[in-house]
Amino acid sequence: ESIEANLKNSSENPDREISLLRSLVINLKAQNEILSASDCKKPNEIEQTEESVDEVDSPFLIPTTTFEKFIPITTIDNSKEGFNMLCIRPHPFFPDLVAIGGVNKCVVIYHATLKSGNQELGRIRFTAPVLSMDFSPFHRGGLLVAGLMDGSTQVMSMDAKGSEEFHGIGNEAIEKRLNTLPVDLSEGISLQSSDVIHLKHSFKDHAKYVVRCKFSQEGDYFATASHDKTVALYKINYSDFNQSFQFEKLTKLFLPEAVESVEFVGGAPSNEKRQLVIACREQCFLTYINLESENFENTHVSINENVWDKHVSFTIMHLEASPDKRYILAATDKARIIVYRVGKSSHIRTMVGHNSDAYFQPRATWTHDSKLIFTNSMGTPGLLAYCSASSRKLQWEGSHTGVIRDIFCHHKSRMLYTAAYDKTAKIFSYR
């Protein structure tokens, strides 16, 4: 009212200006009512943000107090053959059975124990070095996929041919079936009198290195990532009638840059939608492929803390889902390990203290309870342990004499597997 009185005394057209002033006041009152209503929403009506506290579960809240040291169990030495080992994976049901791939173009199965030493059970020789491998976590008999430097993908099985009574190998089954293994390293597939491992199928769907192979948790899909900027997705069908596998390529995805890693998330035990996550070079986002949609719909989720930030400051070189499939561990080329909530860009935790660059192959893996994270480091022949909750370094293990190339943690036992450029693979326990 005071402003209206001043306008009547000083303005040339007071009626018009008073009308505009009243309209402005009405609009301001309306906006204030809207803001007040949003502030008074019930807790369950408030939209979840990137920083919602429900994204941080117990492994990231309570620091581990149980980790004391690495305990060496055994070493698999390949120095006689003179080839470096590039990838290592244990059998998902029998931790003493280990598959190793390397520069010698072979996938070799070892029985690694303290009692009997490290026995080679069988091998398959291919036409190019083996860069990556993964076991199906679902098939007890042992279904293994390997990615080669020539762009091919090889699917192998540890089932016994023609043996209806055989339900997987390990322990007593190994001793009963282990015979002398005449190995022919000249060409093709090795002679396998024990029939421990044999080739099931070969694919040639990539033009460059297959740098990552990954099975889904349910064992019904596997995906391969290549530097030819593509990802191939395959479906596995198992027939109980004739106990055989059928492999079908579902689709081939074309990405903007070289693909470094793929990972499956969702499904059991998270009960979230099943997705395939893809990490490419020179991209500021992760690509999520919805496996439950008919046309494999995709979405992009920023790898930067702020979703509006489009700057590419690092490349994710390795992805690994947490045991509950709700979080993703991302090892980058900038000496950082980042924990993401699936489908979110917020950095739940960030670990620093190791070394990496654009030419290194960083690896990071979870323990079975997600409380520890193990990683390798560029230029240093050792293994580093981080606490998931505090992000601090806990322990350094330096028994390798060469830089570690691959790491894997067995989620059904407290065992850790490493393959290094010193021509050895090592198995540790931790406590």
Image (tube, rainbow, N blue to C red):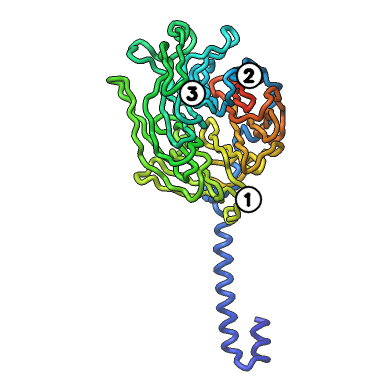
- Callout in the foreground (2, 3): 3
Give the quarter of the figure containing the C terminus. top right
Q: Earlier in the sequence, mark 2 or mark 3?
A: 3
Q: Dot 2: few (<14), some (14–19), or many (≥20) neighbours within 10 Å?
A: some
Q: Position of residue 323 (x, y in %)?
A: 53, 30
Q: Horizontally, is 351 left or right of 27 in the view? A: right
Q: How many numbered marks, from 0 up? A: 3
Residue nearest the observer in this picture, 285 or 20: 285
- Residue wearing tag 3: 107
Q: Position of residue 313 (x, y in %)?
A: 63, 50
- Callout in the foreground (2, 1): 1
Kindly identify the amino acid type of the residue bearing the numbered disc 3: Val
Whether 339 is drawn above or below 202: the answer is below
Secondary structure under the numbered disc 2 in the rendered image: strand
Whether 369 is drawn above or below 301: the answer is above
Mark-to-mark CA distance, 3 and 1: 36 Å
Q: Earlier in the sequence, mark 3 or mark 1?
A: 3
Q: Dot 1: few (<14), some (14–19), or many (≥20) neighbours within 10 Å?
A: few
- Residue wearing tag 2: 429
Q: Earlier in the sequence, mark 2 or mark 1?
A: 1
**Residue 368 in view of the camera:** no
Instruction: Kindly check if marks 2 and 3 are in contact, taking CB atoms under 8 A apart as contact.
Output: no
Write the residue at 45% across / 7% down.
Answer: 179
Q: Position of residue 301 (x, y in %)?
A: 52, 49
Write the residue at 36% across / 34% down.
Answer: 235
Secondary structure under the numbered disc 3 in the rendered image: strand
Kindly identify the amino acid type of the residue bearing the numbered disc 1: Ser
Kindly identify the amino acid type of the residue bearing the numbered disc 2: Ser
- Residue wearing tag 1: 313
Write the residue at 62% across / 15% down.
Answer: 74
Give the quarter of the figure containing the N terminus. bottom right
